Image: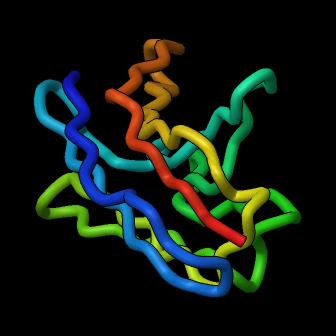
Amino acid sequence: VQLQASGGGLVQSGGSLRLSCSASGSISSINGMGWYRQAPGKLREVVARFISDGSPYYRDSVKDRFTISREDAKKAVHLQMNSLRPEDTATYYCNYYDYAGKTDYWGRGTQVTVSS
């Protein structure tokens, strides 16, 4: 499984960005795909993802600001990030968790920087 992420960049506080991630390889369902982020000096944390039943999960700090969506035919997920805050600054990673094989796959990180 390979994950290709795109998007990210520099935006002012209150602005918006969109991240996209597409999967290739042996993947039957994109349940388990989503986004994590890691800020300097901090642990990697989940941002939003589709869990095993296909429903979306969001960490509390991004609820009502971020929206994760999916395109199953393209094996792609997108993260629309609105009302961005400086504390959203981090490297964002696309992730796919294979529930059957209990294996994590990671894409290359993409930088999101929010200036105040």
Residue 85 location in percent, x, y?
73, 71
Residue 29 location in percent, x, y?
31, 46
The residue depicted at 40 percent of the width and 33 percent of the height is 109
Residue that extends furthest to the right in the rendered view of this protein:
60
The residue depicted at 35 percent of the width and 68 percent of the height is 70
Quarter of the image where the C terminus is located: bottom right
**Nearest the eye: 27 or 82:** 82
Quarter of the image where the N terminus is located: top left
Q: Is residue 92 left or right of residue 83?
A: left
The residue depicted at 40 percent of the width and 24 percent of the height is 106
Residue 31 location in percent, x, y?
45, 49
Residue 20 location in percent, x, y?
30, 59
**Nearest the eye: 22 or 11:** 11
Residue that extends furthest to the front in the rendered view of this protein:
116
Say which quarter of the image contains residue 12: bottom right
Q: Is residue 111 above or below residue 2?
A: below
**Nearest the eye: 14 or 48:** 14
Q: Is residue 6 above or below residue 28?
A: below
Q: Is residue 101 left or right of residue 46?
A: left
Q: Is residue 36 above or below residue 62?
A: above
Q: Is residue 20 left or right of residue 32?
A: left
